[in-house]
Image (cartoon, rainbow, N blue to C red):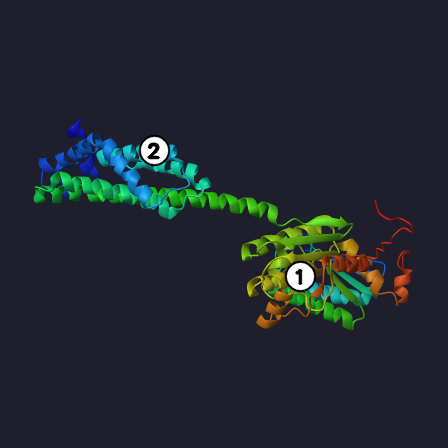
Amino acid sequence: MTPGPALVSILRQGAYLIASVHTALDDSQMVRFQDDLIGEIGRARSRGVIIDVAALDVLDSFGSNTLRSIAEMARLRGAVTVIVGIQPDVALAMVKLGMGTGSVPTALDLEEGLEYLDRHVQHSPAASARGGERSR
Amino acid sequence: MQQQDGTDTRDDAPERQDPGEQEEQLLPQLVAHLREHRTRLRQEWSNRIQAAHLLEAMTPQEMAAETTSVYDNYVEVLETGSVEALQHYARDLSERIIPRGVETHEVVGIVLLLRDVLARSLFEKYQQELGLLNRVLDAYEPAANRIANTVAVSFVEERERVIRQQQDAIRELSTPVLPVRERLLILPIIGVLDSERARQLTEQLLTGIRTHRAKVVVIDITGAPDVDQTVANHLVQTVDASRLMGASVIITGLSPKIAQTLVTIGVDLSKMNTIGDLQGGLEEAERLLGYAVTREEGANGP
């Protein structure tokens, strides 16, 4: 729908989805990202979602609100969400403006995020299937 | 030469042009008078300085040398009306005497004393002719005030430069972020935390978390004498920001006084993980990271 290169890539990795935001999203793009990701959770039957915002140097209040909502929606659809790669400046700005990530867990980078999910999605059979490629 | 000097003076005091030639002769005349009685007036000035207990940090020889050059500079400014040379001299002088603990009031005091000594000598010289004395003082006072002003400002500027330099030095060494184990940072805070330092600390900590891929940070504030509301809130923000980057923060070494202050002013620290001292904090951090430090049996230390 949006012309040009994809602004967000949503990749399947075993039982997890990895969504990398490549550039600052405006409000409508953010909403579209939310739709895509929530839909994909169902299609891929994912148990965990990692949202990687390492490429962002700004995150406005709408953005962080949407991230919070995505996490909540993902939880309702059975997936744990972790946000990774928040830059130091972004972290400080978010805290200054009083818009943390609420109860959504955060991790330093993708690797840490995967480890977090491995620890917190233990009880699902999907998690044990990670490592070998899952077939559907 | 006198004519030329008179012209210079007129540039600085344009409102005095009208009375004509006679006025222009006044300052050179005055300067000549001050040059003529240089030794006596300078001696009188030194005595006044001693009587007022100023510049006691300096030896008599230094005093003599400095007072002579201040006197000469002073007369020169009266003559030329240009304070630039004096500015340089005052800055040099300040650079030399500030490290010796000379205070602002002393510097201003000696310049004002010199002004008084010279004014008094002018009184003596012209006391017979009140009209002339008035005009002499009209010429002398603005110049003298400008000199006092210049010296004081130069001194204070030099002082501020020194202070800024020291602030920079303190800032550079004030907030080390130290990796103690893999993924564990400690951040000892020594000295008063103002908002500027707190801001810098946060910045360094967050950058440190990313470079060292830290999971746990121990902030030790044993060395911080006091924490006010602004700084406490900043600490809370730092903790939140670190959490956003996936690191958990342990705060250690809250003194009884700081603990009381924080509770009294109502900072919400319920989300903060605090532990009594740095040792406890490190142990907790190691536990979080899964390190187990054991002591070898029979090792009694070095």
**Disc ID at residue B64:** 2
For the image shown, how many numbered marks are present on the structure? 2
Please name whichever residue, B188 or B66, is drawn nearer the observer in this view of the structure.
Answer: B66
Please name whichever residue, B40 or A66, is drawn nearer the observer in this view of the structure.
Answer: B40
Quarter of the image for residue B125 reads top left
Q: Left or right of B147: which side holds B184?
A: right
Seen from this angle, which residue lies furthest top?
B1
Give the residue drawn at x 68%, y 55%: A7
Between circles 1 and 2, the one closer to the viewer is 2
The quadrant the N terminus of chain B occupies is top left
Badge 1 marks a residue whose secondary structure is helix
Quarter of the image for residue B216 reads bottom right
Q: Of the residues under marks 1 and 2, which one precedes in the sequence?
A: 2
Which residue position holds label 1? B239
- The amino acid type of the residue labelled 1 equals Val
Q: Left or right of A112: which side holds B187?
A: left
User: Would residue A35 be seen by someone viewing this image from the given angle?
Assistant: yes
Please name whichever residue, B271 or B222, is drawn nearer the observer in this view of the structure.
Answer: B222
The chain letter under disc 2 is B
The chain letter under disc 1 is B
Spot occupied by residue B11 in the image (x, y as percentages of width and height)? 20, 38
Report how far apart the C-alphas of labels 1 and 2 lie in the structure.
60 Å
Q: Is residue A104 above or below residue B154?
A: below
Badge 2 marks a residue whose secondary structure is helix
Task: Please say if the residues under marks 1 and 2 sit with CB atoms less than 8 Å apart.
Answer: no
**Disc ID at residue B126:** none
Q: Left or right of B89: which side holds B283?
A: right
Please name whichever residue, B147 or A98, is drawn nearer the observer in this view of the structure.
Answer: B147
Spot occupied by residue B159 in the image (x, y as percentages of width and height)? 43, 44
